[in-house]
Amino acid sequence: MMRSLHFHVSKTEPTDVVDERVREMLKAAEAAIGELREAGESFDFKVEPVDDWITPAAAAATLGVSRQHVRRLMDAGELRGRRKENSTHWLVSQGSVTASLQRREDGLQVVNDWSRELDELGVPAE
């Protein structure tokens, strides 16, 4: 079984160097996909921007929750996390924290809209 391929391209690299590295990456990826297909294996192929990673404590402070709750959110798939290299410590995707804050804000907006509509209909508050 083959191991995962991971390629990183820095935004500071010159364009000609990036172009050559991308060609090399695609060639390696094509070979790996061919091997997996021949073996009848399933595979994922993903290209994504690099994310900034923060500590669970920093994520907790941003979200206004405990560090333990951040771990629960990671376990539930609500926040993306990964272990630090050669460590038992975790890091949290800043992008997933920002997305969580946006989902929270969107949810509050929906609740406020429903509340306003109920008030306009004259539904008594309990």
Image (spheres, grey):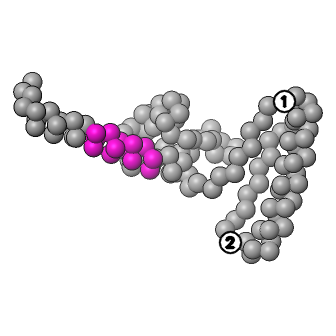
Q: Quadrant of the N terminus?
A: top right
Residue range in magenta is: 98-110
Q: Majority secondary structure of the magenta segment?
A: helix
Q: Residue at x 73, y 57 (%)?
A: 8
Helix, strand or loop status at disc 1: loop
Asked whether residue 107 is drawn in magenta, I would say yes
Q: Counting residues from the N terminus, which is met first, the one under dot 1 or under dot 2?
A: 2
Q: Quadrant of the C terminus?
A: top left
- Specify few, some or many for label 1: CA neighbours under 10 Å numbering under 14, 14-19, or 20 or more: few
Q: Residue at x 74, y 43 (%)?
A: 45
Which one is in front in this view, the residue at disc 1 or the one at disc 2? Answer: 1
Q: Nearer the viewer, residue 20 or 3?
A: 20
Please name the amino acid that badge 2 sits on: Thr
Query: Circle 2 sits on which residue?
Result: 12
Q: Outermost residue toward the top?
A: 126
Q: Residue at x 80, y 46 (%)?
A: 5
Residue 13 marker:
none
Helix, strand or loop status at disc 2: loop
Q: Is residue 64 visible?
A: no
Q: Residue at x 62, y 38 (%)?
A: 88
Count the numbered circles shown: 2
Q: Nearer the viewer, residue 17 or 85?
A: 17
> Would residue 113 appear left or right of 4 to someone viewing this image?
left
Query: Circle 1 sits on which residue?
Result: 41
Q: Is residue 17 visible?
A: yes
Q: Position of residue 78 (x, y in %)?
A: 49, 36
